[in-house]
Amino acid sequence: MMIRETTYQIPLNGRRMTVFAARPDGPGPFRAIILYMDLFGLREELFDLAREFANDGFAAVIHDMFYRREKSIFKPANEKDGSVDPDAIAAGDETTVAMALQDTRGLVCAVDKGLLEVSVSGYGAIGYCMGGRHALAAAARLPDRIHTGVSVHGGKLVAPTEDSPHLLIRKLRVPFWFAFAKDDPTCPDDHQTLIQAEAASVGSHVSCTALPAHHGWTFPARWSHDAAASRFVGERAVEMFREGIAEPQGRTV
């Protein structure tokens, strides 16, 4: 399949938010997927994920969630017990759910106005690591636009506050799936148990799977990469998006 990929700059909050998009080279319309990045910022590892979804027939977009900061790209930690750049951790903590929802609305508005030069029939959301909680928030708070969602080895989903991201599960009205990692310091077993309990309380449209793979299994260049887990999650995500997002009808104008 021929893939068209483009990088855009969207004016937002007095700044410019970078968006990478990959989609089939055709007239559309397409189902769209918003990818929420991990802690280390926009880079080829993430662009490759967008390209994979485009090869499956989706219009995939991933935006710079750190565009409010001067430094927005960090070197991924690539040792089992390696330290993470403190500035990357600060960037993730500074990027609140409210900020991410505002950015999602801005991104969807730009696509609605023709950013991708094709129309879309609806959106799915998938978040990796840090992005897991933001995909959850998008699906919970914007169900009229985000029709299904996935959290892939999501981190910091549980916080000791009244606005802990995992409490958004109670707001979910669309299908959502949590894929947990083992021995994950960003989402330890007690957090996974809390999330599973919340999921069970709202109904079968929210589900959880604990995989025998380490946090960060998605990325081939990482020590934690697990090809079987990555393939399983990718295939199930595609299935969810095809079932949950309205089938495209007709052609764009």
Image (cartoon, rainbow, N blue to C red):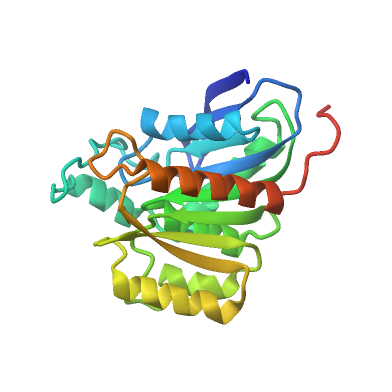
- Tell whether 237 sits left or right of 209: right
Task: Give the percent coordinates (x, y) of residue 23.
Answer: 62, 28
Q: Residue furthest right?
A: 250
Q: In this view, does 36 lie above or below 143?
A: above
Q: Is residue 16 above or below residue 178?
A: above
Q: Which of 118 and 248 is in front in this view?
A: 248
Which residue is rendered at x = 37% and y = 71% of the image? 192
Quadrant containing the N terminus is top right
Task: Give the percent coordinates (x, y) of residue 66.
Answer: 37, 42
Q: Which residue lies furthest to the top in this view?
A: 2
Which residue is rendered at x = 52% and y = 74% of the image? 199
Confirm whether residue 220 shows in the render. yes
Confirm whether residue 163 shows in the render. no
Q: In this view, does 145 lie above or below 27?
A: below
Task: Give the percent coordinates (x, y) of residue 150.
Answer: 52, 55
Which residue is rendered at x = 41% and y = 78% of the image? 162
Classify residue 141 by image quadrant: bottom right
Which residue is rendered at x = 56% and y = 49% of the image? 237
Q: Residue furthest front?
A: 228
Q: How many labels sit on residues?
A: 0
- Tell whether 243 sits left or right of 171: right
- Tell whether 58 sits left or right of 97: right
Task: Give the percent coordinates (x, y) of residue 250.
Answer: 86, 33
Quadrant containing the C terminus is top right
